[in-house]
Image (spheres, grey):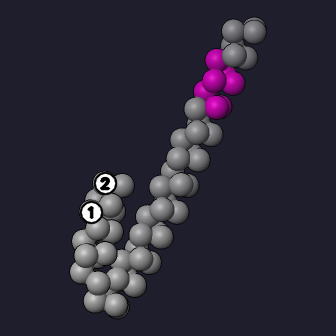
Amino acid sequence: MDKMKETYEAMLSLTAEMVWDDAIKKHRTNKIYVAIDEALAAGDEAAFRMLTNELKTLQ
């Protein structure tokens, strides 16, 4: 029974980590989209290229 509990806790921990990682990725992606919009509005091509490259690495 203890082995089953340990396995369950390990799986629960991994699931929580996956949810956390996904939330961080979504948050960062949204921040990059906002920054890309700002770079486009300002005509900052260097920032636009840097941000789009960063976005590509996240996806």
The magenta stretch spans residue 8? yes
Percent of width and height locating residue 18? 54, 41
| Camera-side residue of 29 and 1 | 29
The residue labelled by disc 1 is: 53
Q: Quadrant of the N terminus?
A: top right
Q: Residue at position x 31%, y 54% from top?
A: 57
Question: Element under label 1?
Answer: helix
| Label number found at residue 57 | 2
Do the numbered discs 2 and 1 sit on residues whose CB atoms are within 8 Å?
yes
Residue at horizontal 24%, vertical 71%?
A: 49
> Is residue 25 highlighted in magenta?
no
Q: Nearer the viewer, residue 19 or 25?
A: 25
| Label 1 environment density (alpha carbons within 10 Å; few <14, some 14–19, many ≥20) | few
Q: Please report the residue visible at 33 percent of the width from the left and 61 percent of the height from the top.
A: 54
Q: Amino acid at mark 1?
A: Asn
Magenta stretch: give its range.
Answer: 7-13
Point out which mark residue 42 bears: none
